[in-house]
Image: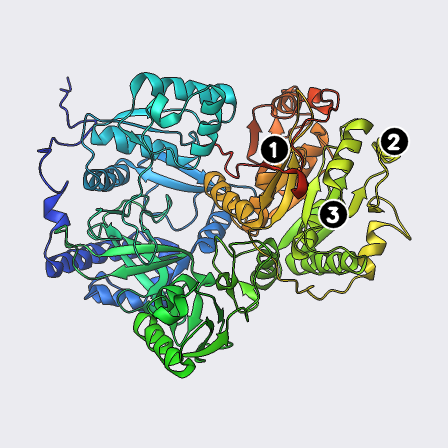
Amino acid sequence: MPEYSDTILGSAPRDPDQQFWDPEMQTMDRELLRELQAERLRTMVGRIIDRPVPLFKRKLDEAGIGNAADIEDVDDLDAIPLTVKQELRDSEAEHPPFGDYRFDVTNVVRLGTSTGTTGTPTVSLFTRHDIWLEYESAARNYWRNGWRPGMTVTHAHPAYLYGGGAMLSGCLEYFGMCNIWVAPPDTDEIAEQGIRMWERLKPDVSFVAFSLGRFQEVAAKMGLDLQTDVGLPGYDLRGMGDKGMPLMTAGLECYANSSGPCGVDPGGHLHEDWAIIQAINPRTGREVPDGEWGDLVVTTLDRDNGMLRYDLEEAVAIVHEPCSCGETTYRAFWGGRFKDFIACQDKHFQVNEVERALRRVEEVKTPSLEYVVVRPAHHDAPLLVRVELAEGDRETVAARCVAAIRDALGVEATVEILERDSLERSGVQGHTARRRVGDHAMDLIHSLTLGDLLAEHRRSYPQRTALVCGETRATFPEMDDRVNQLANALRAQGVDQGDRVLWLGQNCHRLLEGLLATAKLGGAFCPANWRQSAAEMAFILEDLDPAVVIWQEAEIGETVGAARALHESGALWIQHDAVGEGSYEALVADGSRDDPGVSVDPASSVLVMYTAAFTGTPNGAQLSHTALLVQDLVMGMMQEIGSDYVYLNSGPLFHVATFMTTMATFHFGGTNVFTPRVDAEEICRLIESERCTGAFVVGPTISEILRDQQGSLLRPHVAADVRGRTPLERDDHRRHEPVGHEARRVRPDRGHGDADPQRLGW
């Protein structure tokens, strides 16, 4: 009979006062650590050749490696070609179900999924040994943070086929912490359950980050403050430095707990006994110098299912300088998408690194630092920086700026000194010239606009389908052409920055085109509830005061007409489901395909969403470009949205619950499929024909789809991830309370409501 010990489901006990979780590995001599890496790398290469593991075997063949003994040192990795995620997707499609890059499928005890190009999810496989390795890696991170077994910790990660929630919970329990796993706050009721549990148990540590705003909102409705009343501790991210965030993960499919910060010196300590993590110059395939940015490339070690030179296509900077904490492992920083960095003289860097260099020059900081970085035309060209100067000798200051940039970034720069107020300012106070790079927004979080994103997709995904709507299919370049045509046509009609465009219609690809065209002009786009009464539509017409109304005759034409009669609007009215003169398509045909070239402030409002207003008139919440893009990034991570994602827009696009996944799909270069309204049979047809990997489908529709167990609607071979949600949008939402006059309104002269861009699921 088996006997229990406290190490069966957890780790061996440690002295809580010891500094490191695994002192032997975390403080190993660098030469010994490198020998260990080489030994484990040879073991991995031997397994690839002996089994074989076909995908990685082909990589070794290309490098001329036919035997494990050919690996003499870790540096021999540089000869092996990189592997990117698209190759994994292709492998699974060509060699179902798991692809030809797996080492061991027999001993797998857990899997997690992401999306796939044909509707089949990409699968991450874990053996008991691989799970243990992740648990031990996470334990090092927790110990560094000062956490100890016996503490309580809470999180709200999603579960089931999403592997992250199970992995996090397992890591916490293995470490010996009490795991308070609350449900993602999809509804107020579910959020309240978590809040009440926190109120009772008072957790010591919180992993609640992405859904924190949603929990705060519900707590406020309950009359509670999450920290002072409920006792939820704040989420503390350590390890921030000049280069930004510490590297903490290489993805669930590769190495979920690859590294973590100690809080003494910046950056995240790499777990180098279990992975060789490199910063690679994608042009040469070789490592960049210490502290410079490169592609994050990971080779896992000592795993049953490993990765060989897996390029995550994200930016990493690795610092070799010893850490003051005493750990001998290297530290690393994460920088987002590598292709968004400035490439110059074989160096890669972020625009904020240029700013930090310029701030060393006192003369250009007064009264504020204003500059523009011009992206080099080719990688050997000097970096051109334009800087404003209030007082001082221009030549001297320019030379000091050049020296500061050279010292900080290792590149030669040409610095042009300009008079104050020479550089273009944005239209919003507090957002100035320094947020621009050349003619294109650069800083990913604070300077990118929706128009910039579409232009990038045009360049990066020239053959990829961007949208499907009925008989209409368009690639990103075709979509961008139509958006430019619409924007230029609207501009010719007098639409300008700050103007509003109202959509009174059902789901359609023209809605997304309208948003993006308005975004390129610096305006705000509002998809209104097409189910409203004439009085409610008239209220929005009066409140929003749109310059343009794009409307629909089918199903709602009579209501729209009645609304126009109730409120005389000076707007340009365009019928999108008409043909011929005066129609949407006729307007688009009149516009130029050239980008309108309007300088747009990322902080300006681009989307207006009206609330349901059960007890009064609706509020118009305004979201900026930045807010939408931040939401996209979070939603993309939460739902594992990538460029292979195919999203069925079946829920109403006047509701943020549907719209936020639409925008995340667009942001990550996926495909948006549109259907005018919810129809169970049409949903099933589109899922099958377009190989949709995600959809917004509420409970009653799911019940209708599944009502016939023989599958009259849903056939067994329809492979899709239909994301059922709490019924956020029911038929009784189509009518609000009688329209009054006390609601906060959208017009700037009357105030406006603010929308939380992170009403998220965890």
Question: Mark 3, residues whose alpha carbon is within 10 Å: few (<14), some, or many (≥20)?
Answer: many
Q: Of the two numbered discs 2 and 1 on the same chain, state the one appearing first in sequence.
A: 2
**Element marked by disc 3:** helix
Vertically, is 184 above or below 638? above
Residue found farthest to the right: 581
Give above or below for 36 relative to 209: below
**Residue to which mark 1 is pinned:** 696
Alpha carbon of mark 3 to alpha carbon of mark 1: how far? 19 Å
Looking at the rendering, in which quadrant would you find the C terminus? top left
Q: Which residue is drawn at 61% across and 47% down?
A: 605
Q: Is residue 165 left or right of residue 260?
A: right
Nearer to us of marks 2 and 3 is 2
Front position in the image: 389 or 156 = 389
Tell me the residue that label 3 is attached to. 510
- Measured in 3D between alpha carbons, the distance from the residue under mark 2 to the one under mark 1, in whole angstroms, is 31 Å
For this view, does 589 lie left or right of residue 728?
right
Q: Can you give x and y, in whole percent of width and height, for residue 57 in the image?
A: 35, 59
Kind of element beneath mark 2: helix
Q: What residue type is labelled 3?
A: Arg
Q: Is residue 536 left or right of residue 177?
A: right
Label for residue 562? 2
